[in-house]
Every structure is written in C-alpha cells, then in structure tokens.
Image (cartoon, rainbow, N blue to C red):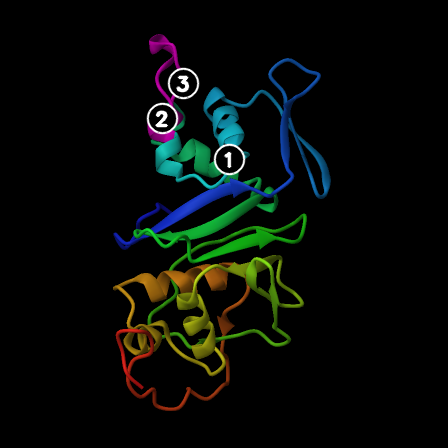
C-alpha cells in the first residue's frame, strides 16, 4: 500500500533497534542479525541493499528510498523501479516484516503518531483499510504500560507491540473500549480527515483492533473529542 494515502499521514519504515546489516561470506550476500538470530539475503538487488542500510539508521519513507536511488550509469545504485514499477522494495521488505518497525507519521512538526514493533519471528504487517461500517474493538487481554518512551500496548496473541507517541492515538484507543466503526470514530474525533482511519488501520494490522463479532455497538458518541472539540 502506498504512503500518504490520505494526503496527511505518512508511512515510515525502519529496522528493529539493534538489527545489524553486514556483508555475508558469499559474494553479494547480506546478513541481518537481530533478536531472532541471523537472516541471510542472497544476492539482493543493489536497491534493496541500499534500502536496508538506510533503514538501519532510522525511519524512512519508501517513496524517498526509491527516489534517492539513481541509475547505475549516473554512478548511483540501480533504481527499485527496474524491478517492476517500484514494487520491488515493497515486496522484499514485506518478507522481512519480523525485522521491520512500521511507523505512522503525520504531516506536521510534532513527530510520529505510533510505531508497530514486531515481537515474534513470524510477524507480518498486513496493512489494509478497514471497512468504514465494520465494528472493531480492542482485543481481549490487551494491556497498557507506561515507560520512558510513553504508552505501550500489547495483546496476548498479537505479533506486534504498539508504541504510542502522541495523544491522538490514545483518543482512538479510548473509543475501542466499546465496539465502534471507523466512520463513527472519525466523526467523534477532531482530527484531520483520514487520520483516525489510518490510526485504526495500523492498530488492526498490529492486532490491537479486532472485528467485534456479536458485540453491541457502543453507546451514542456525544460531541467531538480532542482539543478542537467539546464533550
């Protein structure tokens, strides 16, 4: 899925903290050493190698990675677009989901909204828009903890832990105590268009928003939450 789907939010990618990218023993081989041991990537395209080394440094937009790779005849790396309309990087990075942090940013100067950090060697971040009228809620057994980096959210069967960076995400999590649709959540929160839905998409991909089958809808939401709204 492309980033900037709503013109306001930004999808960012980075390697899990502590993951090291090194050259392997075989020619052209890369070795990624992380929390679950070492993983070898045989003969990666130069675009993938360059992307992994940049992700090792911190969060990056995939579009920026592709734009920053110049053709080899100009002395740079081969562009990702050579491998099929720019989907090469996305395809191969998704195969390494268990080593990649997915961060939701927003087009302002206040920092990212949340990060989904893999906590399982089989973690796969399947990001897709939630249907606007589908009831979702927090999964059973979800727990919240407060640490030096802010609020952390986990669920027993989830392959990801969500690190909350800004209060807007807390507002959305608060609505998920009751079954709620993305449409209802967007109407209740005083956030730019599409931001609430994108937060919900990330929470769902991380296992922190699940389909509310057989649950009753939440009570009527009165007013709009947030600094620009009123209760």
Could you tell me which residue is drawn at 35 percent across and 75 percent down?
A: 185
Could you tell me which residue is drawn at 30 percent across and 52 percent down?
A: 108
Pick the front one: 207 or 21: 21
Pick the front one: 98 or 174: 174
Packing grade of label 1 (10 A; few <14, some 14-19, many >=20) is many
Image coordinates of residue 109 in percent, x first then y, are 33, 51
Residue designated by label 2: 68
Residue designated by label 3: 78
Tell me if 59 is positioned left or right of 31 in this view. left
User: Which of the two marks, 1 or 3, is nearer to us in this view?
Assistant: 1
- For the residue labelled by badge 1, is the local secondary structure a helix, a strand or a loop? helix
- Segment tinted magenta in the rendering: 66-80
Image coordinates of residue 81 in percent, x first then y, are 36, 27
Packing grade of label 2 (10 A; few <14, some 14-19, many >=20) is some
Task: Give yes or no for residue 142 being in the magenta stretch.
Answer: no
Tell me if 40 is positioned left or right of 87 in this view. right
Residue designated by label 1: 55
């Amino acid at each position: 899925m492309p980033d900037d789907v709503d013109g306001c939010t930004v999808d960012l990618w980075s390697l899990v903290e502590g993951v090291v990218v090194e050259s392997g023993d075989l020619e052209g081989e890369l070795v990624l050493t992380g929390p679950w041991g070492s993983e070898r990537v045989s003969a990666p395209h130069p675009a993938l190698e360059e992307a992994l080394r940049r992700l090792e440094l911190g969060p990056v937009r995939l579009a920026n990675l592709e734009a920053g790779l110049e053709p080899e005849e100009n002395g740079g790396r081969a562009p990702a677009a050579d491998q099929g309309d720019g989907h090469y990087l996305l395809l191969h990075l998704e195969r390494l989901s268990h080593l990649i942090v997915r961060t939701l940013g927003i087009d302002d100067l206040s920092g990212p909204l949340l990060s989904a950090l893999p906590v399982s060697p089989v973690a796969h971040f399947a990001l897709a828009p939630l249907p606007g009228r589908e009831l979702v809620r927090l999964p059973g057994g979800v727990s919240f903890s407060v640490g030096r980096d802010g609020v952390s959210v986990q669920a027993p069967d989830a392959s990801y832990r969500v690190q909350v960076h800004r209060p807007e995400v807390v507002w959305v999590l608060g609505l998920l105590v009751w079954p709620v649709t993305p449409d209802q959540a967007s109407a209740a929160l005083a956030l730019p268009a599409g931001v609430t839905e994108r937060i919900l998409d990330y929470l769902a991909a991380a296992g922190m928003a699940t389909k509310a089958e057989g649950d009753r809808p939440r009570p009527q939401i009165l007013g709009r939450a947030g600094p620009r709204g009123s209760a």
